[in-house]
Image (cartoon, rainbow, N blue to C red):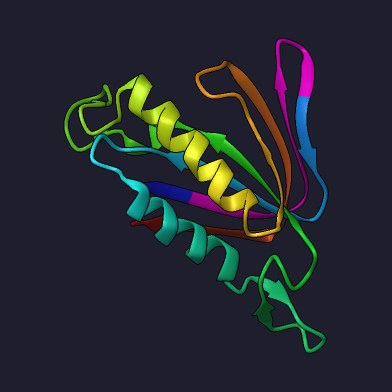
């Protein structure tokens, strides 16, 4: 499971010309699901994302997590994160989850994240989405669990 988190002042997802999810201050999480991912991977990534300190405290140091700033998280599935780009000019997706497994893991991830009490929004799995954001900083981190 691969996650890219971006600290944002706002972010939204549009599907078929309609905004389906949006947040203000918080995190945009682009989530790539691999074929061998399990509930263990979900637990680890949820813990990492919710506890990672990337918001400024009163001294301007990145010491606060998303919960401490009362932020939200917008999760967007992005299968291209699991692409193998080591050879040639065309990405390979053999490490990626099947659509069925990917959607199951994505839904479980959203539910697990929502159960932390953090306001959670999500894109639509498998949809053609337009994602807009204002990256605050910019601050961007990647995780692989």
Residue 138 in picture, x, y percent from top left: 66, 58
Q: Relative to the observer, which residue lies in front, 99 or 111? A: 111
Residue drawn where x is 77% and y is 12% of the image? 17
Q: Is residue 32 left or right of residue 22?
A: left
Q: Is residue 36 left or right of residue 51?
A: left
Quarter holding the C terminus is bottom left
Q: Residue furthest top?
A: 16
Q: Is residue 48 left or right of residue 79?
A: right
Q: Relative to the observer, which residue lies in front, 10 or 39? A: 39
Residue 88 in picture, x, y percent from top left: 19, 26
**Count of number-bearing discs:** 0
Residue drawn where x is 60% and y is 41% of the image? 75
> Quadrant of residue 54 in the image?
bottom right
Residue drawn where x is 42% and y is 51% of the image? 42
Residue 118 in picture, x, y percent from top left: 71, 57
Q: Residue furthest bottom?
A: 59
On screen, residue 65 above or below 101: below
Residue drawn where x is 25% and y is 34% of the image? 35
Q: Main secondary structure of the magenta part?
A: strand
* The stretch drawn in magenta includes residue 11: yes
Bounds of the magenta segment: 4-19
Residue 113 in picture, x, y percent from top left: 58, 52
Q: Relative to the observer, which residue lies in front, 107 or 16? A: 107
* The stretch drawn in magenta includes residue 15: yes
On screen, residue 139 above or below 74: below
Q: Residue furthest left?
A: 87
> Quadrant of residue 57 in the image?
bottom right
On screen, residue 118 above or below 97: below
């Amino acid at each position: 499971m691969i996650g890219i988190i971006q600290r944002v002042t706002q972010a939204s997802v549009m599907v078929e010309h309609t905004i389906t999810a949006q947040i203000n201050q918080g995190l945009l999480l682009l989530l790539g699901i691999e074929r061998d991912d399990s509930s263990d991977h979900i637990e680890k990534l949820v813990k990492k994302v919710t506890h990672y300190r990337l918001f400024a405290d009163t001294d301007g140091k990145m010491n606060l997590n998303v919960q401490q700033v009362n932020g939200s998280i917008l999760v967007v599935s992005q299968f291209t994160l699991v692409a193998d780009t080591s050879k040639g000019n065309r990405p390979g997706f053999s490490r990626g989850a099947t659509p069925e497994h990917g959607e199951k893991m994505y839904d479980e991830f959203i539910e697990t994240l929502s159960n932390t009490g953090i306001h959670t929004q999500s894109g639509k799995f498998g949809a053609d989405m337009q994602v807009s954001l204002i990256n605050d900083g910019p601050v961007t981190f990647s995780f692989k669990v």
